[in-house]
Image (tube, rainbow, N blue to C red):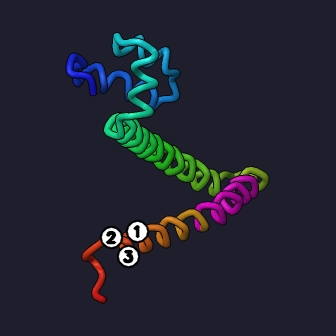
């Protein structure tokens, strides 16, 4: 990157891009020109790698919040299974069964992906 660009400028721009901002917004956050941001994105692999890394971190954080919410929601539905009104118990049971197949399928895909990623890592195979 340019010699006069400070690391905090790069980080500010990368964060804006990672969160879906425009090059103009990234330029403003970093205190550089829109052209500079476009140039970084096109010619500086480290910049795009940082954007990608930030996106992964943000996605992981969001997934963690979703999992926490699903846990709370499933606890609430489970509590409703003991409700005195049969219609509420039935609705809670239906809601649980509607969610489960999708979760099960996603977990299976995640497990398979982890196995593939592990097998693709150099030096980890027993061949």
Q: Residue at coordinates 34% horizontally, 37% vertically from top-left?
A: 50
Q: How far is the residue under mark 1 from the one under mark 3?
A: 5 Å
Q: Looking at the figure, which quarter contains the C terminus? A: bottom left
Pointer 3 with pointer 2, Cβ within 8 A? yes
* Res 121 label: 2
16 shown above or below 126: above
- Observer-nearest residue: 101 or 17? 17
49 shown above or below 120: above
* Res 117 label: 1
Q: Judge left or right: residue 45 versus residue 34.
A: left
Pointer 1 with pointer 3, Cβ within 8 A? yes
- Quickly name the residue at label 3: 119
Q: How far is the residue under mark 3 from the one under mark 2?
A: 6 Å
Q: Is residue 102 magenta?
A: yes
Q: How far is the residue under mark 1 from the one under mark 2?
A: 6 Å
Q: Is residue 96 magenta?
A: yes
How far across and how far down the image is residue 117, in percent?
40, 68
Name the secondary structure under disc 2: loop
- Observer-nearest residue: 60 or 101? 60
User: What type of secondary structure mainly makes up the magenta span?
Assistant: helix
How far across and how far down the image is residue 81, in percent?
64, 57
Name the secondary structure under disc 3: helix
Q: Judge left or right: residue 7 versus residue 49.
A: left
Highlighted range, magenta = 89-104
């Amino acid at each position: 990157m340019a010699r006069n660009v400070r690391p905090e400028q790069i980080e500010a721009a990368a964060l804006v891009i990672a969160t879906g901002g425009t090059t103009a917004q990234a330029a403003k956050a970093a205190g550089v020109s829109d052209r500079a941001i476009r140039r970084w994105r096109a010619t500086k692999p480290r910049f795009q790698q940082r954007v990608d890394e930030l996106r992964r971190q943000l996605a992981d954080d969001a997934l963690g919040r979703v999992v926490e919410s699903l846990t709370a929601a499933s606890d609430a539905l489970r509590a409703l299974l003991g409700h005195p009104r049969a219609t509420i118990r039935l609705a809670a049971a239906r809601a649980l069964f509607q969610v489960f197949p999708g979760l099960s399928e996603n977990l299976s895909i995640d497990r398979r992906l982890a196995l593939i990623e592990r097998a693709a890592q150099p030096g980890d195979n027993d061949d």
